[in-house]
Image (tube, rainbow, N blue to C red):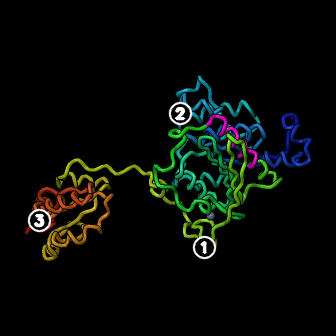
């Protein structure tokens, strides 16, 4: 995009242009800037509205929710008639109305490890307006790996936090919080509540920090955590240090690509116990054909194992099971087999009592497999 300001833009941004700290050059910088706002909720609403109004040339929004009535107490992008509509569509229209001279890009998706690097790579800076730990770690890591700043904000009840994480110049979110809190320990805003104006304060400050970074003016919040208490009211500040052991922003990072953040934060849904304790050879063959084949555990003797076995199986003889069952992954789906299905039924009973709920018995054993599915497996 040509950063040169046209006549419309000169009129629109005149209150910026008269300030020497911004001026025409600064406004042209804003026009050529690309900012991604993750989450168009409480924080994202004011942040995106002020960034749009200020003339950030390309403004991306990531959001996939619909507008709910309980959002309207603080998410000022939306109104009564938007209830039930997709947030991103409403937000895009509202921001266009605020400033038709900029580009507003709608990313209607859930940001995750599969798309974050590509998404972040298209922008100069990210404003994190997310409301959950997996997304915060994801945005932090993607920004550090992508070499761009993460303007962080979070809110709860009457307290808001604000920081600029820039792995190149200072600490990142992981330096501050190396480990996520245990799942369920920190209540969400839905559980604990939030003062409606609070995201207005913090989201606006995120926009302010963003504009300052883009213009290169003032002192940024790199290396500082600002805490706002709305009841005081009072701003406090903590100095943040870069951790020499930070897995992502230190000199010898151990984390060089994105991970599974739901698993890291312990927020992945619990695997469901399998209702049926038995599985037929036909069903097992179907799962394998679909590429969803479970782990196969052979509980026969090593001598039988020498005669024949199912492809991909692992041998763990029944007698050794009581001493070795901890080697098995309790979350993995496992099918146990033996010769005819009797010893494996005992093994499944034992494993289920030990807490492995995703274990099933192959009815008829390897004998049935040979007769019904694959005659190349020798009968004995
Ligand atoms: Zn770090």
Q: Is residue 22 left or right of residue 370?
A: right
Q: CA distance from mark 2 to mark 3?
A: 54 Å
N-terminal-most mark, 3 or 1: 1
Q: Is residue 162 above or below residue 166?
A: above
Q: CA distance from mark 2 to mark 1?
A: 41 Å
Query: Residue 205: x percent and y percent?
Result: 73, 45
Q: Is residue 319 above or below residue 1?
A: below
- On the image, which quarter does residue 201 sit in? top right
Q: Residues within 10 Å of mark 1 (few under 14, many from 20)?
A: few
Residues in magenta, as a range: 195-209
Q: Give the labeled residue for mark 3.
A: 339
> Is residue 324 rendered magenta in the image?
no
> Left of 189 or right of it: where is 234?
right
Whichever of labels 2 and 3 marks the residue nearer the N terminus, that label is 2
Q: Residue at x 68, y 38 (%)?
A: 200
Q: Position of residue 308 (x, y in %)?
A: 16, 71
Instruction: Say above or below: 135 vs 257.
Output: above
Give whichever of 12, 286 is nearer the camera. 12
Asked which secondary structure carries label 1, the reply is: loop
- Is the residue under label 1 in contact with that under label 2 (CB below 8 Å)? no
**Disc number at residue 252?**
1
For this rendering, which residue is in front, 353 or 289? 353
In terms of secondary structure, what is the magenta stretch mainly? helix
Identify the image quadrant of residue 131. Answer: top right
Query: Residue 7 falls in which quadrant of the image?
Result: top right
Which numbered dot is residue 66? 2
| Residue for point 70% across, 48% down | 35
């Amino acid at each position: 995009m040509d950063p040169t300001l046209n006549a419309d833009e000169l009129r629109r941004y005149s209150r910026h242009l008269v300030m020497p700290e911004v001026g025409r050059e600064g406004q042209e910088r804003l026009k050529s800037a690309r900012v991604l706002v993750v989450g168009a909720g409480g924080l994202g609403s004011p942040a995106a509205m002020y960034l749009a109004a200020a003339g950030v040339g390309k403004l991306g929004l990531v959001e996939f929710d619909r507008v709910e009535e309980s959002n309207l107490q603080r998410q000022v992008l939306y109104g009564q008639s938007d209830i039930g509509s997709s947030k991103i569509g409403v937000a895009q229209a509202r921001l266009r109305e605020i400033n038709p001279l900029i580009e507003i890009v709608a990313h209607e998706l859930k940001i995750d490890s599969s798309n974050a690097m590509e998404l972040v790579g298209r922008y100069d800076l990210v404003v994190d307006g997310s409301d959950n730990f997996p997304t915060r770690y994801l945005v932090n890591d993607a920004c550090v790996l992508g070499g761009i700043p993460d303007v962080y904000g979070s809110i709860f009840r009457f307290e808001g936090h604000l920081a600029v994480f820039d792995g190149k110049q200072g600490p990142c979110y992981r330096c501050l919080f190396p480990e996520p809190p245990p799942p369920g320990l920190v209540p969400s805003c839905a559980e604990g509540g939030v003062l409606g104006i609070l995201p207005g304060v913090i989201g606006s400050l995120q926009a302010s920090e963003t504009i300052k970074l883009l213009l290169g003016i003032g002192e940024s919040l790199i290396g500082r955590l600002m805490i706002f208490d709305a009841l005081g009211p009072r701003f406090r500040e903590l100095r943040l240090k870069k951790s020499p052991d930070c897995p992502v922003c230190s000199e010898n990072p151990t984390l060089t690509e994105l991970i599974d953040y739901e698993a890291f934060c312990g927020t992945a849904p619990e695997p469901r116990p399998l209702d049926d304790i038995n599985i037929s050879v036909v069903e097992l063959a179907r799962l394998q054909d679909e590429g969803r084949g479970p782990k196969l555990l052979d509980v026969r003797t090593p001598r039988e194992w020498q005669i024949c076995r199912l492809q991909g199986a692992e041998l763990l003889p029944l007698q050794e099971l009581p001493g070795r069952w901890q080697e098995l992954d309790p979350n993995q789906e496992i099918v146990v087999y033996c010769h005819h299905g009797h010893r494996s039924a005992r093994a499944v009973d034992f494993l289920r009592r030990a807490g492995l709920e995703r274990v099933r018995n192959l009815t008829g054993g390897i004998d049935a497999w040979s007769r019904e599915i694959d005659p190349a497996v020798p009968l004995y």
